[in-house]
Amino acid sequence: MFTDIVGSTELASELGDERWKQVLATHHGVVRKTLKRYNGREVDTAGDGFFATFDKPAEAIRCASDIIDQLRPIGIQIRAGVHIGEVEQMGPKVGGIAVHIGARVASKASASEILVPSTVRDLVAGSDIRFADRGDYDLKGVPGEWHLYSIDRELAGEVPARPAVDAPAAKAARRRTVPALTVVVAAVVVVAIVIVALVVARGGSSNVVAVPGANTISKIDTASGRFAGTETVGLKPSAAVFGGGSIWVLNGSDQTISRVDPSAVKLLSSRAVGGTPTGVAYGAGSLWVTTQFGLTSGAPGSVLRIDPGEPALSKPPITVGSGAGAVSFGEGSLWVANSITNMLTRIDPNTNSIAGTVAVGKGPQDIVVGNGAVWVANALDDSIWKIDPKSGAVVSKVTLTASPTALALDGSTLWVASQIANTLTRIDATTGTTVATITVGGQPSDVVAGPGGVWVSEDSAHSVIQVDPKSNRIVRRLAVDGSPGGLVMVGRDVWVTVGS
């Protein structure tokens, strides 16, 4: 179970330290007592969030429903996602693909809503739990379309405009009981994802000129903090990169790459990949694309080299095995992370072949190259590894308190986003020490840093935020009508892709 209080930074500032602490204490108390009631096990707590597991999907659904009803009277709304699957036990922690899928499912839920994939719905068939079809969704980093269902539940009453610490009301809410739901399930581990949202009435006008919709890439003028242009690309755009005078956008659902002219904010072309693209980089005059789960031709996870001026591949695909995802170009080589084999592969662009491999941490999710080093974010063991690009030796390791999922390097500063903990961590790349940890909320999917500042895309919050590197505070938030994904900086302008 993962939790996130959306907009917690702004809300904490609005409520004041003492009242915010009371809100957190009330929330934590309700969640913990409800977990015990439904046999949920708290795995970790990170600031304003929780992570817990259950033995049965019905108990996870009942627990989420109970939490929703208890917190609504005090102005806290919950959205939840329940997924079922095997997990990897790593000491007191739990990891694995089921955890990541659960987090993605939860990110698609609305306030006071519980979402589940079809596997969970099928397992609780026969109970008195009712479902409403929510259709197919693309879950970031997970192959294929996922059919999701919403738990059909009636929630009466209006939500207060802002959280109020009301101990008697909270106690009365905790006395509520939920009818028992009986389900017989095979011995599996259920990961329940509960995302907490505080619904607060806020006034004031927005500085957004236009709100970009789904399947687009949009330019942000960082000087004014406004959107300065939007162009339609392919279906379910994700990662993007700048190179050769163009911005290249990966589109997961239609398996294409879109080429966009950043000066005119215009789509120039689209080309088929031949598989689901999962990572993109530019270097040595070429575009490099990974297909984490193979090509439609049957080839396993591969790296495709594309000449920007040609419609076809300039070289044969380089097979690196299923799991090839994150990719980055630097120090004269292409670097590819494999989240299944936990290997970092170096590709020589001169020979278009594998030049070496390096074992890294568990579940590498992102790579950034710069300042004479290769940095790898390992999500399953909460670490950042610094690799010497010449020798392949591990120079140092930084242990974090939350899973790193996206990286950005700006000079001697390494920015690390955690989609699970909803944080942005600032690390001194020279010493490897943590300088600051910022709660950003909304499941950050990407981070970019440079002349235009530090920007983070918030998947579930449907927004893009700017962080001031001097104060380490959020100074701007721009809304989008969809799930923001990849970020790329061109000069001082920032570009963001928006999926559905």
Image (spheres, rainbow, N blue to C red):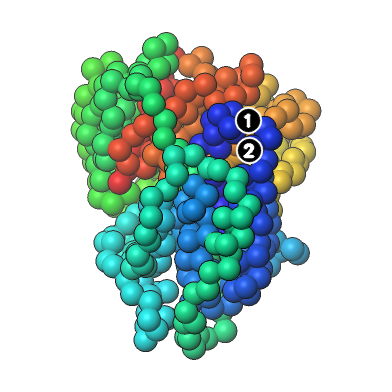
Question: For the point 28% across and 20% down, which residue is it?
Answer: 209
**Residue to which mark 1 is pinned:** 16
Q: Disc 1 versus disc 2: distance between alpha carbons?
A: 6 Å
Outermost residue, front side: 168
Count of number-bearing discs: 2
Residue closer to the observer: 66 or 411? 66
The residue positioned 77% from the left and 37% from the top of the image is 395
Residue at 57% of width from left, 62% of height from top? 172
Residue 223 at least partly seen:
yes
* Type of amino acid under label 1: Gly
Q: Quadrant of the N terminus?
A: bottom right
Where 148 falls versus 394 (above or below)? below
Compared to 112, does 437 lie above or below? Answer: above
Residue farthest along the top direction in this orientation? 223
Whether label 1 touches label 2, CB < 8 Å: yes
For residue 408, side relative to residue 91 (left or right): left
Residue 459, percent across and down?
43, 43
The answer to whether one can see residue 57 in this image is no
Image location (x, y in percent) of residue 132? 29, 67
- At label 2, which amino acid type do we have? Trp
> What mark, if any, has residue 20 been given in the picture?
2
What x and y, as percent, mark residue 248? 34, 32
